[in-house]
DNA sequence: ATGCTACTCTGGTCGGACCACACCCGAGGA
DNA sequence: TCCTCGGGTGTGGTCCGACCAGAGTAGCAT
């Protein structure tokens, strides 16, 4: 196809990059593209789909951020764009940016986190022996050293919570947890200075972590759930983040709509 | 800045587009960029940050897919890239693609859905008068016509479930619900042919929807939660989707790792 | 005053040009 | 014969310049 420099639409509708995205999605759905496979090169796909390489790149960038592919330059079997399907990164980016753009109120994030973690803890406790808590335990040990900076401590803390979700074996919930954590990471760090006695707080957190794990290992779902709820709300209360309470900024001031997914009915809600 | 055609690194590290992404994120965090604001033009930002316009575009594409901006060509106040922060679309794209790429097992998606919906129903029931269920009710009415195609019916059904989440007022959970729904939409439609008597099933679903709403309006959290759980699991059982049971393909066959977010400890889990 | 036309700015695409990188293979030396 | 080293080749990463379509806007002509 020899499209003169400025001939985008050609036969198809606008959004050349979306063409690429849809092509990849279709290939994934019909199984012609599987995790571990290599996508055609950018130039190849460009000519195959009749779009410019720039458009292919834009689509690839999206896929990369969404955690679907991993690109690597050079040559050999490890080069090129490879399907990896690692949702964590994408979920984190999405939630982090949405929180930054005020699409996700911090309160809602905390609430969602509470919900997920409580459920995870209860589920783990209900079937302890089906899960592997070694990772979580190892993280608790790593959190023991008294000289840990708040930053380091909180990173491990976050990893501990994600490890619990991971132990439950649910990829979706794990990804969500990772995303939520990453979304409010900034606020958590911001809250550290508001804590009077960090050493004491750290000790309390360590203790609570152990208690949670014990409740899980004991198979006491209700206790595990209650403890993790207290653990989370307690920390937010102390670090001066607004304790979960009703609030939500206007969904979006943008005066247009008409997405495919937009609801049909009017929305006088709120 | 006059970078000769092929001079990408210049003074900064690789990933020019990421520079743009970070710039925007920072601007959002420090408040210099707010929902409704217009971003600088691509050419402008390009020269400002010392990167090529292509890189700016790649970043913009990511932001667009993530639901952070809305671009529009032309002139005037409505043109350009505008911060909108509508997480639904991005969440849907992410989950849909992850399911397609087998990063999210369908089972896990259903389980997550179950968890979120049950919580939403319970929360709504616990504080009925604080929420507005008009949208949900309206959708139920729209679902009444007996001549509805399964496709149409299921679209409304999905909207009903999302409307419940929306009524709870939690943006994060609403976005997640919308994403999860969109992720398994294909599978749901695929399951329709496996239903022997669609008319009867539709009637049952209508009835269950009403019952759920009644339980919520009655303020009976436990009942609302139980009913919505049965509602969901029941449908999946009937449409022949594998009933939620233990399963999870290998997280990712990709032989590399080393992300910032990767855990420190070994992971012999599953 | 009114109406129409140019202008200008914006995103959307394309194509071509480089760079850095990593593999692969063949030539040449030990 | 085996090992080493240097080019060849292909990949993503980036930049640039060009052009198109759309949408306001200013200004000229009537």
Image (spheres, coloured by chain):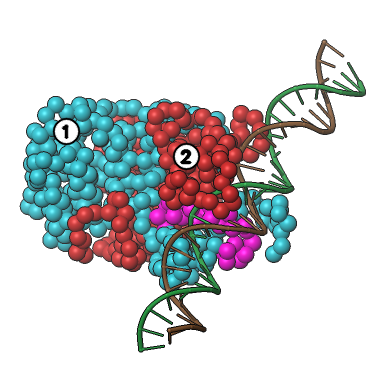
Chain colours: A red, B cyan, C green, D brown
Magenta region includes residue A26? no
The subunit letter for the residue under badge 1 reads: B
Q: In which quarter of the image is the C terminus of chain B?
A: top left
How many other residues sit within 10 Å of disc 1, few (<14), some (14-19) or many (≥20)? Answer: few
Q: Quadrant of the N terminus of chain B?
A: bottom right
Residue B160 in percent (x, y) is at 19, 48
Pointer 1: what residue? Answer: B234
User: What span is in magenta?
Assistant: B43-68
Q: Residue at x 21, y 31 (%)?
A: B192
How many other residues sit within 10 Å of disc 2, few (<14), some (14-19) or many (≥20)? Answer: many
Left or right for A66, reference D18: left
Nearer the observer, B192 or A183? B192
Main SS type for the magenta part? Answer: helix
Q: Do the residues labelled 2 and 1 touch (CB within 8 Å)?
A: no
Q: Residue A242 bears which disc, if any?
A: none
Residue B162 in percent (x, y) is at 24, 49
For the question of whether residue A156 can be seen, the reply is no
Whether labels 2 and 1 belong to a single chain: the reply is: no
Residue B10 in percent (x, y) is at 71, 56
For the question of whether residue B225 can be seen, the reply is yes
Residue B81 in percent (x, y) is at 46, 63
Nearer the observer, B83 or B29? B83
Q: Residue at x 39, y 50 (%)?
A: B90
Left or right for A149, reference A248: right
Q: Residue at x 54, y 31 (%)?
A: A38
Nearer the observer, A170 or A222? A170
Left or right for D14, reference B260: right
| Displayed quadrant of residue B234 | top left
Pointer 2: what residue? Answer: A68
The subunit letter for the residue under badge 2 reads: A
């Amino acid at each position: 196809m020899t499209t003169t420099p400025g001939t985008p639409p050609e036969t198809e509708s606008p959004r050349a990059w979306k063409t690429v995205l849809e092509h990849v999605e279709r290939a994934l759905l019909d199984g012609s593209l599987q995790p571990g496979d290599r996508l055609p090169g950018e130039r190849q796909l460009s000519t195959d789909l009749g779009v410019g390489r720039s458009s292919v790149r834009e689509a690839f960038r999206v896929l990369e951020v969404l955690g679907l592919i991993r690109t690597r330059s050079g040559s050999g079997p490890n080069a090129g764009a490879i399907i990896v399907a690692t949702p964590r990164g994408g979920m984190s980016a999405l939630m982090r940016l949405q929180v930054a753009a005020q699409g996700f109120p911090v309160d809602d994030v905390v609430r969602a986190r509470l919900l997920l973690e409580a459920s995870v803890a209860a589920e783990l406790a209900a079937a302890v022996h089906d899960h592997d808590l070694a990772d979580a335990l190892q993280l608790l040990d790593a959190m023991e050293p008294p000289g840990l900076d708040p930053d380091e401590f909180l990173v491990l803390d976050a990893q501990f919570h994600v490890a619990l979700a991971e132990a439950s074996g649910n990829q979706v919930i794990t990804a969500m947890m990772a995303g939520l954590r990453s979304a409010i990471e900034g606020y958590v760090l911001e809250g550290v200075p508001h804590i009077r006695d960090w050493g004491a707080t750290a000790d309390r957190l360590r203790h609570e972590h152990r208690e949670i794990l014990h409740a899980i290992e004991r198979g006491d779902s209700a206790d595990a759930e209650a403890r993790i709820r207290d653990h989370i709300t307690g920390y937010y209360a102390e670090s001066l983040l607004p304790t979960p309470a009703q609030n939500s900024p206007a969904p979006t001031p943008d005066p247009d709509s008409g997405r495919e997914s937009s609801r049909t009915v009017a929305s006088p809600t709120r």
